[in-house]
Image (tube, rainbow, N blue to C red):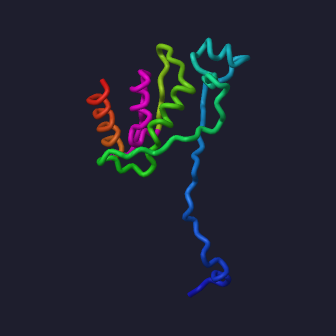
């Protein structure tokens, strides 16, 4: 049975994927100014200055890399993207911690290890915990 008017939508699909992904930045409450917040909590500003000016709010030219054979997570983020976000938002101060409440395949955990920043990862899916654990072990074997 065909729905009335359905033939008018022939060829229309939802198969195109986004070429960008929104990133949310969450921080401590502002204490009068960003500088005061930074001095009190070691976070609050972004390291946006480069040798040629300031970074855009759009991160470009980061390609997806090949995944490990065991990594079948459906939305693995490019390692370089997460490394860039850590460099942008996490000062290298003792006590700063990256918290990833949906650690998935462990991209943020590996990037935190690479940046020598402590991290806490939370994941409800045991299969993804196994993938993240394997990725961290591979990192330890390869880079440490």
Query: Which residue is found at the position 41% from the left and 21% from the top?
Result: 116
Image quadrant where residue 2 sits: bottom right
| Region of the chain picked out in magenta, as a range | 102-127
Residue 115: percent from left, percent from top: 44, 24
| 102 vs 17: above or below | above
Q: Is residue 103 left or right of residue 142?
A: right
Residue 16: percent from left, percent from top: 57, 61
| 120 vs 127: above or below | above
Residue 88: percent from left, percent from top: 57, 27
Query: Which residue is found at the position 52% from the left and 26% from the top?
Result: 87
Q: Is residue 76 left or right of residue 89?
A: left
**The C terminus is located in which quarter?**
top left
Q: Is residue 109 magenta?
A: yes
| 7 vs 52: above or below | below
Query: Which residue is found at the position 68% from the left and 22% from the top?
Result: 30
Image quadrant where residue 120 sits: top left
**The N terminus is located in which quarter?**
bottom right
Residue 109: percent from left, percent from top: 41, 32
Q: Is residue 40 left or right of residue 63?
A: right
């Amino acid at each position: 049975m065909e729905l009335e008017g359905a033939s008018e939508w022939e060829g229309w699909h939802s198969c195109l994927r986004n070429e960008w992904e929104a990133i949310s930045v969450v921080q401590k409450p502002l204490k009068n100014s960003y500088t005061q917040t930074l001095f009190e909590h070691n976070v609050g500003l972004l390291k946006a200055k480069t040798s040629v000016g300031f970074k855009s709010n759009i991160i470009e030219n980061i390609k997806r890399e090949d995944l490990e054979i065991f990594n079948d997570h459906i939305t693995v983020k490019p390692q370089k993207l997460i490394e860039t976000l850590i460099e942008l938002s996490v000062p290298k101060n003792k006590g700063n911690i990256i918290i990833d409440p949906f650690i998935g395949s462990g991209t943020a955990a590996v990037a935190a290890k690479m940046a020598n920043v402590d991290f806490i990862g939370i994941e409800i899916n045991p299969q993804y915990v196994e993938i993240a654990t394997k990725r961290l072990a591979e990192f330890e074997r390869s880079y440490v």
